Structure formats: C-alpha cells, structure tokens
Image (spheres, helix red, strand yellow):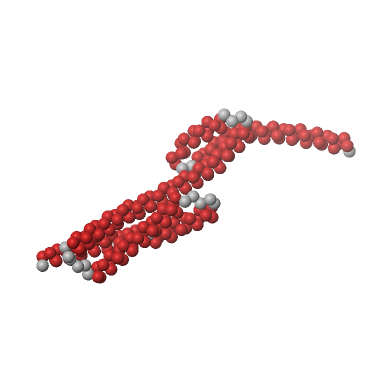
Amino acid sequence: MALIASIGLFVLSILGAALSGILAKEIEAWSPSIVRGLIKLAVGRLPEKLRERFSEEWQSYVNDVPGVIGKVIEAARFLLAARRMAMIDRRDKEHEGWGQKVAELEGFRSTLVGVARSLDSVFAILGSEGIAVPNALKSDVDRLNQLMSEFKEKKDKLAELVSADPPNLVSKALNLRRRRRLLEEIDISSHVTIQKKADEIMKTLKLRRRNTRRH
C-alpha cells in the first residue's frame, strides 16, 4: 500500500512539474499580448492629448523590465496611473472652467463700474446746472446701485470658493455645491437686467437735461 502511494505521489509530482512547465510556457507566449492589451487599455483612459506620448513611453518602459511576470505587473500598474492622470485632468479642466466664469463676471462688473461712474457724472452735471432729478428716478438709481453691490458681493464669494482648496472629498463636494448655487443666483439674465436698467436711467437723465435746457 505504501509502495502504491509513493508511486502515486511520484506520478503526481511529474504531472505537476509538466503542467507547471506548460503553464509557464503559455504565460510566456501570451505575455506580450497581455502586456500590449493592458497598455492599450490604460492609454485609452488617458486624456486624448497624452495618449500618443504615454503609449510609446509605457511600451518602452515595459520592454526594459526583466521577467515575464514583472512586465505584466508593471503594465497593470499603468491602469491605476492612467486613472489618476485622468482624474487630475478633469479637475484641471473643471477649475479652468470655473476660472473663466469668474473672469466673465469680473468683466461684467467692470462694465457696471463704468456705468455707475457715468451716472455719477450725469448727476453732477445736472446738479451744476440746477436741474432737479425726480425722486422716482433717484429711487431707480438707488435700486440699481443695490443690485450692483449684490452682484459684486456674490461674484467675490464665487471667486473665493473657486480659489479654495478643500482638504477632503466631502469638503470638495460641498464647495462645488455652493459654487453652483451661487452661480444660479447671479445668472447671466440678471447681468442683462442690470445693464438694461442702467441704460434706461442714463437715457432718461440725458433726455431730462436736454428738455430742461430747451426751456
């Protein structure tokens, strides 16, 4: 019985060695295709502008890695690297987009500053010429100044949120939520409304001056 068991173990060891050899040869034969496939998959996850560069760099790097298993492991690590790089690229694009929104709002604020100065100049001219400005129009100007002040406050708050760098994912999500809510509050339609109202006031003031001077 012991002899049979020994023979059985001997046969199993031979079969195991043979199978291991066959498996090793199969892995070695298939490894180039596996490595190329992993690199191709990783490159496909990269931003388009980086794909050609890293396709060549990663393949060149893997070629210098010794051993079949080592090449496969390194190629698999490229998947993680590609995911991180794609996330960074998305964050950069998102930050750039928010920066452009803030720049647009700042440009409009500069326009409003010019409008406010023009109104002040017209009021000064009317005052020097002894031309009275109706209280209703003064109320419109006060409301316009209030709207411009609110606009500046919200624009500055949005710029502050965009420039912030929250320490964790929860804080980042809350920051993004505040940005979107604030941007909704200062929708472009409100900019147009302020500009239109300012233009109407300016025309009314100039018309009143012309009419007064004629009389």
Q: Quadrant of residue 75?
A: top right
Closer-to-camera residue (29/105): 105
User: Is residue 190 visible from the viewing direction of this image?
Assistant: no
Q: Position of residue 103 (x, y in %)?
A: 36, 50
In this image, 56 relative to 7: left or right?
Answer: left
| Residue in view at x 46 percent, y 35 percent | 53
Say which of 61 and 69 sits in front: 61
Q: Residue at position x 47%, y 58% from top?
A: 177
Q: Quadrant of residue 135?
A: bottom left
Q: Position of residue 82 (x, y in %)?
A: 52, 42
Please determine whether, in this image, residue 170 is positioned above or below residue 143. above
Q: Is residue 117 visible?
A: yes
Image mark count:
0
Seen in the image, is 87 located left or right of residue 148? right
Q: Where is residue 77 drawn, in percent x and y?
A: 57, 39
**Quadrant position of the C terminus in the picture:** bottom left
Q: Residue furthest left?
A: 215
Q: Quadrant of the N terminus?
A: top right
| Name of the residue lying farthest toward the right | 1
Residue in front for this viewpoint, 35 or 113: 113
- Identify the residue shown where x is 51% and y is 39%: 40
Q: Give x and y (percent) for residue 3.
A: 87, 35
- Say which of 204 and 215 sits in front: 215
Q: Quadrant of residue 124?
A: bottom left
Relative to 81, 189 lies left or right: left
From this view, report whether residue 100 is shown above or below residue 63: below
Q: Residue at x 45, y 54 (%)?
A: 161
Q: Does residue 171 lie above or below 28 as drawn?
A: below
